[in-house]
Amino acid sequence: MNLVTGRIVEIYVEGGTTKAKVGVAGAHFRVVMTLLMDAKVGDGVLIDSGVAISTVQQIETMEVSHVLSDPR
């Protein structure tokens, strides 16, 4: 499982699937948004294997990123 958090920069439809351009640590990734159809630009999202699985608050985004980057 590769969980990361990021912020939605753009939402668009590609091939009939709603996707988003999500900023993660200075990079941008294309993410499938099928599970979060009510998310909007500016929202923080938790991503697993290229799919946004949950929205997260600002403070949660920072905490999750910190936990996931801990090398233990």
Image: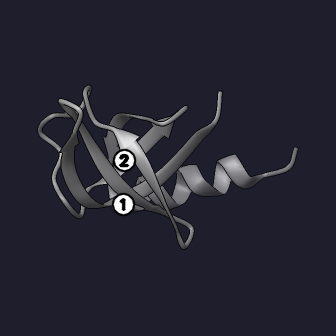
On residue 45, which mark appears? 2
Extreme residue toward the left, this view: 38
Q: Locate residue 36: give its quadrant.
A: top left
Q: Secondary structure at mark 1?
A: strand
In the rendering, at what x and y percent does residue 12 appear?
19, 50
Q: Locate residue 44: give its quadrant.
A: bottom left
Quadrant the C terminus occupies: top right
The residue that appears at 36% across and 62% down in the rendered structure is: 58
Q: Amino acid at mark 2?
A: Val
On residue 50, which mark appears? none
Q: Residue 38 vs residue 57: left or right? A: left
Quadrant the N terminus occupies: top right
The residue that appears at 55% across and 32% down in the rendered structure is: 49
Contact between marks 1 and 2 (CB within 8 A): the answer is yes
Q: State the colouring used for the structure image.
A: one colour
In the rendering, at what x and y percent does residue 62 appear?
51, 61
Q: Residue 26 vs residue 7: left or right? A: right
Q: Residue 40 vs residue 30: left or right? A: left
In the image, residue 70 above or below residue 19: below
Q: Which residue is mark 1?
A: 7
Q: Amino acid at mark 1?
A: Arg
In the image, residue 25 above or below residue 12: below
Extreme residue toward the bottom, this view: 26
Q: Locate residue 38: give its quadrant.
A: top left
